[in-house]
Structures are given as structure tokens and as C-alpha cells.
Amino acid sequence: MAKELTILVACGSGVATSTVAQEAVKEICKDAGIPAKIVKSTMTEIPSKQNDVDIIMVTTNYRKPVTKPLIKVFGLISGIGQDKIRDEIVKTCKELLD
């Protein structure tokens, strides 16, 4: 059994949109058979939390350098480009698990 990925889902406040995104990401991982633990945070917490996670997913633009793969997941909330984001999440997770 592969290890479990830790996914950081961050939004501006760490509450509203990240909760919606978190649920969507949880479903995507479950459907793809990817073992994942999801942690929520605010955008400002990314630098301090990125070392404890495998992937960072953000609901708004994040321009600072990160040490982990970064996926923009606003489309999971807006409904725009959901399939593309879903594919990117699954592909990135599977690459990290290999």
C-alpha cells in the first residue's frame, strides 16, 4: 500500500472556499483511489506549513515560491475547468505516490 499524501488546501481566510475545495479534493482522491489526508490553512500559512505536506492546493493566486507542487483549485468551486483540475490533481498525486 502506498503512503498517504498530505494535501494542503489554502484560501484567503482558511474557512469558506477551502472547505468547499477540501470536500471536492477529498472526493477526487477517493474516486481515483489515492490515499490522502487534507489539511486546511490560510494563504499566509503556506510558507510555514509547506514542509509538512506533499501538495499545495490554492483557491486564489499564490505568487510566492513554494517547495511543493502547487495546483490552483478555484475551478472546483466555480465549476469552470473542473475536469482539467481533477485530471491535474490525480496526475500529480499519482506521480508523487510512484
Image (cartoon, rainbow, N blue to C red):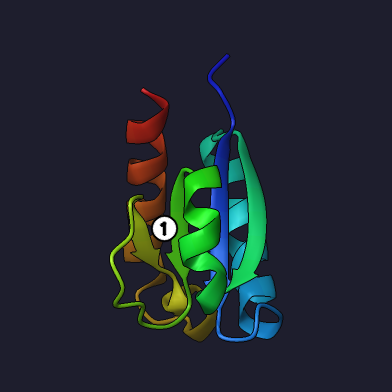
Q: Name the residue furthest front.
A: 48
Circle 1 packing at 10 Å, graded few (<14), some (14-19), many (20+), is: many
Q: Name the residue furthest top.
A: 1
Residue 15: quadrant of the picture? bottom right
At which x and y percent is residue 21? 59, 70
At which x and y percent is residue 44? 52, 77
Q: Residue at x 62, y 74 (%)?
A: 18
Which residue is denoted by mark 1 in the rendering? 86
- On the rendered structure, is 33 left or right of 84? right
- On the rendered structure, is 55 left or right of 63? right
Q: State the quadrant of the N terminus.
A: top right
Q: Residue at x 55, y 79 (%)?
A: 11
At which x and y percent is residue 95? 32, 33
Position of residue 47 relative to residue 37, above or below, is below
Q: How many marks?
A: 1
Q: Nearer the viewer, residue 47 or 96?
A: 47
Q: Residue at x 54, y 80 (%)?
A: 77
Q: State the quadrant of the C terminus.
A: top left
Q: Is residue 23 visible in this depiction of the protein? A: yes
User: SS for tag 1?
Assistant: helix
Q: In the image, what residue type sits under mark 1?
A: Arg
